[in-house]
C-alpha cells in the first residue's frame, strides 16, 4: 500500500469514528431520564422564549430520526445547545474554557513524557542499577497514586503550610501584560506538578520496557562490533527502535490524561474544561456534558490520527500492513 | 540425560479418563507457575499486602460497631487530629478516620474486583469472537468498536454514564466495567488470532469440532493466562477509577469507600483548613492496594508469558 493510500485510509477511519461518536452522543443523551424539553423547562435561567427558540432550533418536537438529522446539522455547524445553568451557548462556553486546559494538559504531557522517556532510557540502559531500581519503584508508586488526591496533598503542603503558591484559580485577575504571565505561571505550578507527577510513571515504565525489549537484538551487537561508540549505539540504534512502540502508547494515553485533568482542575479550581465538567455534573447540566464529551472525544480522535500519520511516516513497515 | 538414568520405575496405573489426565496436567502446570512466582520478590510483597487487605475487607467491618460509623451516633470529638482512641483523628461528624478506612476497604475492593470481572467478561468475549473470526467483517466491526473504546476519554464517558445511571454501587461497577474492557479485548484478540493458526486447532476442526467447542475448549484455555495477568492489572485501574469518580462526587453516597472519604474531606475544606489526618490515610490505602495489584500483575505476566521470563 502506498503512503498516500495509507493516509487516506487513516483519515477515512478518523472521520468514521467521529461520525460514530456523534451518533453515540445523540442517543446516549436520549436514553437518560427526562426528555430534553422538560430538562430545558427545569432550568431557572431560561425564559419561555429561550426554550421555544431551542425547541425550534433543535426540532425537539419532531420524531427521533428527524431530531437526529437536525442534531447532526446543528453540531456540524458548531451549535451545541445552551447551558441549563447559565443560559449561554455551550460552544462559546467550551471555547472560553479551552485555553486553560490546553495550557495545563499540553505542558503537563510534554513534561511527563519528556522526563519519563529520559528516565526510562537511563534506567533500561543501566538495568538493575540503583538509579533503575529507585526510578522504577518511584514510577510504580506514582502510577498507583490517584492524581486528585496527590493534588490535594500538594495543595495542603505548598499552598497551605508553606504558602509558596496560590491555593487555586487561574490568575489573581488584577494584573496585565508581563505581570499577568508571571501571575498565571504562579497559579499553574501546582496543577502542572500534579499532572506531571501523576503521569510520568507510566511513561518511565513504557519506555523502559520497550528499550529492554530492543536491547537483546542482534543489530546492537553488530553496531558494537563495528566499533560504534556506546553513546551512539544507544541513541541511533536502540532508542530509535524502542521509541516507536512508546510513541504509539503515548498517543493512546492522551485520552487518559484528558480525564485526569478533570480531577486536577477540580481540585485546583483551574477554570478549564475539567472544572466545567465538574460543575455540569453537580448541576445536571446535560447539554454541557454532551458538548464536553463530544469535544474531548474528537480531540482524542484527532490526536490519534496525528499519531497514526506520524507513525506511518516514522515506520515504513506500518504502511505496508 | 545423565541425571535421568536412575529414573524410578513408574508405578502401574489404572487407565485414566482424559479429564483426569487434563486435571493432573493442569495441577502440575499450576505448581510450576507458583514455584516461579514465589521467586519473584516484588510479586510476593504485593501478594502479602493484598492478603492483609482482603482479610481487613472480610473481617474489618464485622469488628466495628456500626454506630461508630453513623454520622448521627458517632461519639468522637469533631475534626480532631490523631489522639488516644482515635489513632488517625476524626472527621467532621466525630467518626474515627481509622475505622472509616478499615470499613471502606470492603467497598473499594468489591468495586475493583467486580468491575474487573465485568470488564474481563466483555473483553474476553469480544476479543475471542473477534480473533476467532479474524479477517471477517464481524472482526472488523468488533475491532473498530474496541479501538474506539480504547482511545475514548474514558472518564468523560464514565461521568456521563454515571450521571445518567445514578449514584449506586452497582452502577459504579457497571460504569467502570463498560469503560475498561477495551485493552483486554485487544490483548485477547491478538492471542486468539495466533491460537487459531495452531495445528491442534486445525486438528480439532478437522475432527468436526464446532465453533463453540473450538472457542471454549481450545481458544479460551490458551487465552486464559494472559487474561488472568491482565485482570490483576485491571483491578488496580478499577480501584483508581472508583477513586476518581468518587472525588468527582459520583460515588455511592450511602457507602463508605476510600474515594468517598477523600471526597468528603475535600468537600469539607480539608485542604484550606489543613485536616491532613482525614485526607492522607484513605489515599495511602489506595496507593498500597493499587501498587500491590500492579506488582502482582507484573509478576504474573512474567510467570505466564514465557517471552518475558528470560529478561
Image (cartoon, rainbow, N blue to C red):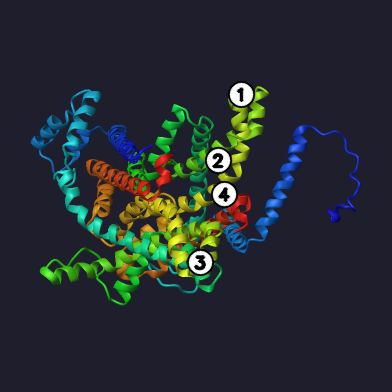
Q: Are marks 1 and 3 in contact (CB under 8 Å)?
A: no
Q: Secondary structure at mark 4?
A: helix
Residue A45 percent across, percent down from the top left: 13, 44
- Chain bearing tag 2 is B
Work out whether mark 2 precedes mark 1 in sequence or the reverse, and give the earlier one. Answer: 2
Percent x, y for residue A254? Answer: 35, 52
| Residue highlighted by disc 1 | B210
**Which of the chains bears the disc numbered 3?**
A
Residue at the disc numbered 4: B229
Q: In the rendered structure, are the residues bearing label 3 and label 4 in contact, judged by CB atoms less than 8 Å apart?
A: no
- Distance between mark 3 and mark 2 Cα atoms: 30 Å
In the rendered image, is residue A175 in sight?
no
Q: Earlier in the sequence, mark 2 or mark 4?
A: 2
Q: Nearer the viewer, mark 3 or mark 2?
A: 3
* Disc assigned to residue A125: 3
Label 1 vs 4, first from the N-terminus: 1
Name the spot of residue B99 as percent of width and height, x first.
49, 62
Mark 3 or 4: in front is 3
Amino acid at each position: 500500500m502506498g503512503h498516500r493510500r495509507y493516509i487516506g485510509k487513516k483519515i477515512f477511519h478518523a472521520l468514521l469514528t467521529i461520525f460514530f461518536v456523534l451518533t453515540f452522543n445523540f442517543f446516549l443523551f436520549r436514553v437518560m431520564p427526562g426528555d430534553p424539553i422538560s430538562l430545558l423547562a427545569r432550568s431557572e435561567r431560561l425564559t419561555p422564549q429561550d426554550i421555544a427558540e431551542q425547541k425550534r432550533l433543535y426540532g425537539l418536537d419532531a420524531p427521533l430520526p428527524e431530531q437526529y438529522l437536525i442534531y447532526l446539522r446543528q453540531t456540524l455547524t458548531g451549535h451545541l445547545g445552551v447551558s441549563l445553568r447559565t443560559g449561554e451557548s455551550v460552544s462559546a462556553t467550551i471555547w472560553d474554557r479551552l485555553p486553560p486546559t490546553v495550557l495545563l494538559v499540553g505542558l503537563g504531557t510534554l513534561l511527563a513524557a519528556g522526563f519519563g522517556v529520559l528516565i526510562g532510557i537511563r534506567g533500561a540502559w543501566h538495568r538493575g542499577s540503583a538509579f533503575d531500581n529507585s526510578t522504577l519503584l518511584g514510577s510504580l508508586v506514582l502510577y498507583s497514586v490517584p492524581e486528585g488526591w496527590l493534588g490535594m496533598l500538594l495543595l495542603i503542603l505548598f499552598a497551605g503550610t508553606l504558602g509558596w503558591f496560590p491555593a487555586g484559580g487561574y490568575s489573581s485577575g488584577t494584573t496585565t501584560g508581563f505581570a499577568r504571565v508571571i501571575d498565571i505561571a504562579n497559579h499553574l505550578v501546582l496543577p502542572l506538578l500534579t499532572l506531571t507527577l501523576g503521569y510520568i510513571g507510566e511513561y518511565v515504565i513504557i519506555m523502559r520496557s520497550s528499550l529492554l525489549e530492543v536491547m537483546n537484538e542482534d543489530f546492537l551487537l553488530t553496531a558494537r562490533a563495528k566499533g560504534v561508540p556506546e553513546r551512539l549505539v544507544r541513541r541511533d540504534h536502540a532508542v530509535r527502535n524502542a521509541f516507536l512502540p512508546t510513541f504509539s502508547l503515548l498517543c493512546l494515553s492522551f485520552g487518559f490524561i484528558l480525564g485526569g485533568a478533570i480531577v486536577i482542575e477540580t481540585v485546583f479550581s483551574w477554570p478549564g474544561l475539567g472544572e466545567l465538567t465538574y460543575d455540569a455534573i453537580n448541576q445536571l447540566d446535560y447539554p454541557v456534558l454532551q458538548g464536553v464529551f463530544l469535544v474531548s472525544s474528537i480531540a482524542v480522535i484527532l490526536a490519534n490520527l496525528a499519531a497514526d500519520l506520524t507513525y506511518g511516516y516514522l515506520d515504513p513497515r506500518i504502511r505496508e500492513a | 540425560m545423565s541425571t535421568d538414568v536412575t529414573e524410578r520405575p513408574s508405578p502401574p496405573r489404572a487407565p485414566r479418563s482424559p479429564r483426569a489426565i487434563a486435571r493432573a496436567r493442569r495441577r502440575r502446570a499450576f505448581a510450576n507457575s507458583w514455584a516461579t512466582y514465589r521467586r519473584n520478590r516484588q510479586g510476593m510483597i504485593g501478594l502479602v499486602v493484598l492478603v492483609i487487605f482482603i482479610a481487613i475487607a472480610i473481617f474489618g467491618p464485622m469488628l466495628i460497631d456500626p454506630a461508630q460509623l453513623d454520622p448521627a451516633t458517632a461519639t468522637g470529638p469533631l475534626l480532631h487530629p490523631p489522639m488516644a482512641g482515635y489513632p488517625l483523628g476524626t472527621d467532621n461528624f466525630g467518626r474515627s478516620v481509622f475505622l472509616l478506612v478499615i470499613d471502606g476497604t470492603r467497598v473499594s475492593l468489591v468495586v475493583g474486583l467486580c468491575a474487573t470481572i465485568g470488564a474481563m467478561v466483555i473483553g474476553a468475549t469480544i476479543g475471542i469472537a473477534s480473533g476467532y473470526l479474524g479477517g471477517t467483517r464481524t472482526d472488523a466491526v468488533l475491532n473498530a468498536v474496541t479501538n474506539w473504546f480504547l482511545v475514548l476519554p474514558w472518564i468523560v464517558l464514565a461521568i456521563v454514564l454515571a450521571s445518567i445511571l445514578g449514584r449506586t454501587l452497582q452502577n459504579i461497577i457497571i460504569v467502570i466495567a463498560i469503560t475498561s474492557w477495551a485493552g483486554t479485548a485487544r490483548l485477547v484478540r491478538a492471542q486468539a488470532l495466533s491460537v487459531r493458526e495452531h495445528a491442534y486447532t486445525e486438528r480439532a476442526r478437522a475432527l468436526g469440532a464446532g465453533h463453540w467447542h473450538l472457542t471454549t475448549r481450545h481458544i479460551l484455555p490458551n487465552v486464559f493466562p494472559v487474561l488472568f495477568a491482565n485482570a490483576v492489572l485491571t483491578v488496580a485501574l478499577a480501584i483508581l477509577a472508583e477513586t476518581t469518580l468518587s472525588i468527582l462526587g459520583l460515588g455511592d453516597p450511602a457507602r463508605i469507600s476510600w474515594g468517598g472519604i477523600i471526597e468528603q474531606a475535600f468537600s469539607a475544606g480539608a485542604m484550606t483548613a489543613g485536616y491532613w489526618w482525614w485526607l492522607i490515610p484513605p489515599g495511602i490505602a489506595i496507593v498500597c492496594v493499587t501498587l500491590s495489584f500492579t506488582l502482582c500483575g507484573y509478576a504474573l505476566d512474567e510467570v505466564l508469558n514465557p517471552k518475558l521470563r528470560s529478561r
